[in-house]
Amino acid sequence: MKFTLSWLKEHLDTDASVEQLADKLTMIGLEVENIEDKAKLLAPFTIARVISAEQHPNADRLRVCMVDTGDGGAPVQVVCGAPNARAGLVGVFSAPGTYIPGKNITLGVGTIRGSGNHGGGFVHKAGVAAFQAMLDSLADGHSIALSADVPKVARVAGLGIIKLAQASGRPIYPSAIATSRRLVLDNWDRTTINLPFGRGAGVAAEPLSVPNDADEAALEDARRLLEDRLNAATRRAYELVDGASGGGA
């Protein structure tokens, strides 16, 4: 037999918790086998309202929305693929990490593994598969974060991210993060390990879009521009935490 707590309280004048009631029922011979708290499962979901919705500058089927999530915090930016997304729309919001009952999935941030170089190793290091996986993810409305290699001998941006932006129609947002407390290893790429309890700074440069019909020369120009903007963002991030240009990158 199944019954709700509200039904039970229609017949009992009590302020006891559901756990206390279950114990009492079991003690008088009415064993309670299970308690399902539907409200607890749905607690991460909030009723949200779209404050504004603008067309994504580089994707016809996406909308960039500012959303009041209903938790009393600041509005958050959500990239939405729903064609009816508009200001004033009320719906359900759930953040990454939320479990979706009935679907048996948990919202989260995924990782696409793969690497490449300017030679044949691109194939052997899963670069082709990773490139296609990123294209598919972007087409589904997701955003992708790529970390940049910073070798000791030169800072050179690769063409991979440029071609990804060209094929997907999505812009690149060059950005850099620096911390005042860090360890810089004496290895080939000067690996930096950020340490806690210090100052941190994040700098975002001007977005970079790559036209779909860009030729090889235009792609190279875009690559150099991305390289310049990444370097400028990195310098500025270290200036903010160190007060000196360049820092430990």
Image (spheres, helix red, strand yellow):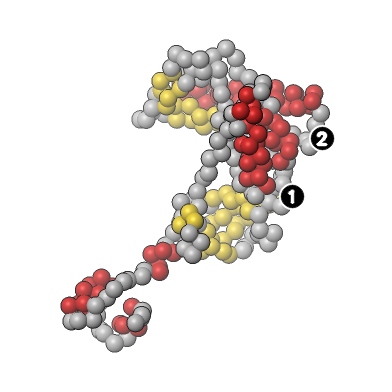
Contact? badges 2 and 1 (CB < 8 Å): no
Residue receiving disc 2:
213
Mark 2 neighbour class, 10 Å CA radius: few under 14, some 14 to 19, many 20 or more: few
Name the N-terminal-most of marks 2 and 1: 1
Can you tell which mark lies on residue 196? none
Which amino acid, by three-letter code, is at mark 2? Asp
Question: Callout 2: helix, strand or loop?
Answer: loop
Which amino acid, by three-letter code, is at mark 1? Asp
Along the horizontal axis of the image, is 184 left or right of 92?
A: left
Mark 1 neighbour class, 10 Å CA radius: few under 14, some 14 to 19, many 20 or more: few
Along the horizontal axis of the image, is 1 left or right of 231?
A: left
Residue receiving disc 1:
60
Asked whether residue 187 is in view, the answer is yes
Instruction: Kindly identify the residue that appears in the image at 47 percent across and 21 percent down.
Output: 191
Name the image quarter holding residue 144. top right
Q: Is residue 183 above or below residue 20?
A: above
Q: Is residue 127 above or below residue 53?
A: above
Question: Callout 1: helix, strand or loop?
Answer: loop
In front: mark 2 or mark 1?
2
Q: Residue furthest bottom?
A: 11
Residue 226 percent location from the top left of the image: 67, 26
Asked whether residue 175 is in view, the answer is no
Along the horizontal axis of the image, is 142 left or right of 55?
A: left
Image quarter where the N terminus lies is bottom left
Instruction: Kindly identify the residue that appears in the image at 73 percent across and 41 percent down.
Output: 169
